[in-house]
Amino acid sequence: MDNNMYNLANAIDKATQLSTNAPTSMQITKIPEIQSKTVREQTFLEYLEINNRTRDISTNNVVFFEETGGSDAEFIPEVGIPAYTAKQFTEHPDHTRTIAIPIEVSMKAQDGNDTINLKENLITDGYIKVNNLIDQALLAGDATTNPLEFDKIWKSVDSDSMGASITEAKVKEAIRTCIDNGGTPDCIVTDSVVADQLDALVSPFIRYNNVTEIALGHTVSTFKSTDGSFIPILVDKNVPADSDEHRLAVIDSSTIDIAYQRRPSYIELAQTDLATRSAIYAWVTAYNTAPFKSFVIDGITE
């Protein structure tokens, strides 16, 4: 985001607080048509939302608690209690980030136009673009490079490099690592190149239907985990890839915490010329509270 986004954020604030002509902003209802588009455009974000990994907060300030350590259950004699190992919860204070997209329709363009509702079309498009930027930050965000965004959820996740096409053994090794670290991996996130490699690996050996539905009839292929479960393979265009190297992440989604101070919402801005001005915006941030429960494989070649 550049200075234009700062200006837009100020305009939103001004319209909300100072303009008597501007109505209160309202969250956009996710009708089936919009959800159908978002689940294909921002697959990972939609999967996390369906699995209740989002929460609403009422303040700009948010604290994430990263967990490490803790006691294990063990067999003991009749008398005595095992030594206690405290689970550590490290506080990570944060604040929500502002994402916004402007919408402007000239009064002349819409006047007498019964063929298409330009404003409605731009609102739908803007909603998808705002969600896309959230999804992109989840998978590729770097607050060190750009303080306006938040860090990707696999910033601190352990990783290994392939230097070749993906193999079934490598994926199973990554899954075992997650399980051994106390995780319950429930999704694989990658791009279409690696997803095609995975399909080529497992499809000849699957005699039953190896797909699962994640939302509104949107089905994805699955990978059989070491523990016998079938993990959905989420193909997301926002997974970062170099020109000749790709990556795959085995994720325990229960460790992902997405906090919304304001979910994607629509607000009308004060009219200053012969055009209606409005915006779609969101206040959001995210954190991986237990990165050791996930694993990344990078350096995958075609």
Image (cartoon, grey):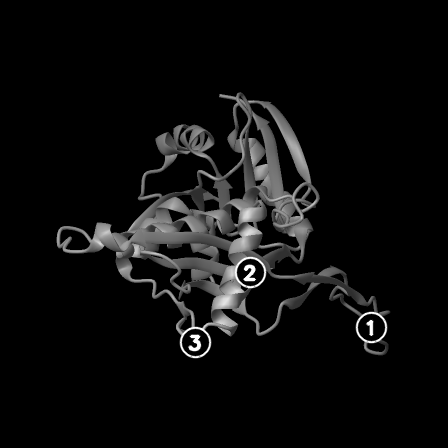
User: At 62% from the left edge and 54% from the top edge, which residue is drawn?
Assistant: 183
**Amino acid tagged 3:** Thr
Q: Which mark's residue is nearer the viewer, 3 or 2? A: 3
Label 1, label 3: how far apart the Cα atoms are: 73 Å
Element type at mark 3: loop
**Amino acid tagged 2:** Asn
**Amino acid tagged 1:** Pro
Relative image position of residue 168 (x, y in whole percent):
51, 32
Q: Quadrant of residue 157?
A: top right
Q: Which residue is mark 1?
A: 77
In front: 221, or 202?
221
Instruction: Look at the numbered discs 3 and 2 and tell me whether their residues touch, using CB distance below 8 Å.
Output: no
Label 3, label 2: how far apart the Cα atoms are: 16 Å
In front: 255, or 117?
117
Element type at mark 1: loop
Of label 1 and label 3, which has the lower sequence position? 3
Q: Residue furthest bottom?
A: 79
Q: Is residue 134 left or right of residue 143?
A: left
Of label 1 and label 2, which has the lower sequence position? 2
Relative image position of residue 56 (x, y in whole percent):
53, 70
Q: Which mark's residue is nearer the viewer, 1 or 3? A: 3
Residue 72 in the image: above or below residue 288: below
Of label 3 and label 2, which has the lower sequence position? 2
Relative image position of residue 83 (x, y in whole percent):
86, 69
Q: Is residue 225 left or right of residue 277?
A: right
Q: Which residue is mark 2?
A: 10
Instruction: Look at the numbered discs 1 and 2 and tell me whether their residues touch, using CB distance below 8 Å.
Output: no
Q: Which residue is mark 3?
A: 20
Q: How many marks?
A: 3
| Other-residue count near label 1 (Cα within 10 Å), few / some / many at <14 / 14–19 / ≥20 | few
